[in-house]
Image: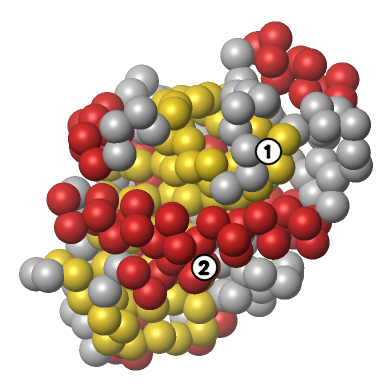
Amino acid sequence: MTTASEAAIEAAAVLAEKTGVARHDIALVMGSGWLPAVDALGEAVAEISTTDLPGFAAPAVAGHAGKVRSVRSGERMLLVFLGRTHFYEGLGVTAVVHGVRTAAAAGCSTIVLTNGCGGLRETWSPGTPVLISDHINLTATSPIEGANFIDLTDLYSPRLRALCQEIEPGLDEGVYVQFPGPHYETPAEIAMVRAIGGHLVGMSTALEAIAAREANMEVLGISLVTNLAAGMTGEPLNHAEVLEAGNAAATRMGQLLGAIVPRI
Ligand code: 8IG
């Protein structure tokens, strides 16, 4: 057993003790713009700071609260991360995926990864949700170490995407490109993303999805486009405006997730 999975088993044990919930079924990671949507998921049974669990780093960004909430949704228990550790914090890729591995160790067989991101399609006005169909990992690293050749074909579950399409017909899909950040892209980098087949740009999700697949979880990825990608509007990107667009869309994202999760 690796040290990373031992750390996740320890964190899951403390999580069970502090929440009073022995096992969780579905994990959700709430990215920027998604935090207010948590209330649409169900009744909160417990909420703790991730820093009360072994192995979690303190939150670095405003809008990333660093809490984990245990939520009842019908017969099932959801483990909802309000915020995540980003690659750009410089704590290493193991820290980035510790929540994912903890969720797997806590019993979760499905994970819903959400994020706020830039969009490359003119029709995606700020506040548009887009299903992630695949990713391109431009971080030049992996959460997996050693000769462990994990298959990433169909990483973003076709079954769960079809379910989302049933619930919200016509939901757009796109390829998510994870950059290391924390700077946004240059217009030339956005031209590159277009050329390599990307539609969404952000600083999370791909590394987490890889770790989730390694842990045998089924992965659903949903992006909230909060801004058009760099160079597309003629205006500079502004972090405060990006957060505002996310919060404005939160009610719709809550309705969407609240409809999807009971049917997973
Ligand atoms: I919200 O335009 C959000 N996060 N890399 N580029 C990258 N990350 C983002 C963006 C964006 N918008």
Q: Is residue 62 visible?
A: yes
Which residue is rendered at x = 79% and y = 61% of the image? 240
Q: How many marks?
A: 2
Which residue is rendered at x = 80% and y = 49% of the image? 182
Q: Nearer the viewer, residue 141 or 166?
A: 166
Which residue is rendered at x = 56% and y = 81% of the image? 51
User: Disc 2 residue type?
Assistant: Leu
Which residue is rendered at x = 60% and y = 14% of the image? 197
Q: Residue 150's x, y, as percent?
A: 38, 29
Q: Which residue is disc 1 drawn over?
A: 118
Q: Residue 13's x, y, as percent?
A: 31, 78
User: Disc 1 residue type?
Assistant: Gly
Q: Which residue is disc 2 drawn over?
A: 35
Is residue 139 shown above or below 133?
Answer: below
Query: Mark 2 falls on what kind of element?
Result: helix
- Give residue 169's quadrant in the image: top left
Is residue 16 shown above or below 127?
Answer: below
Q: For the residue with label 1, is its CB less than 8 Å from the closest atom of ligand 1?
A: yes
Which coloring applies here? secondary structure
Mark 1 and mark 2 in contact? Answer it, CB < 8 Å: no
- Give residue 131's quadrant in the image: top left
Q: Residues within 10 Å of mark 2 (few under 14, many from 20)?
A: many
Q: Residues within 10 Å of mark 1 (few under 14, many from 20)?
A: many
Q: Is residue 93 visible?
A: no
Q: Nearer the viewer, residue 191 or 259?
A: 259
Q: Residue 146's x, y, as percent?
A: 50, 35
**Res. 205 mark:** none
Is residue 7 shown above or below 31?
Answer: below
Q: Is residue 216 left or right of residue 246?
A: left
Is residue 43 shown above or below 212?
Answer: below
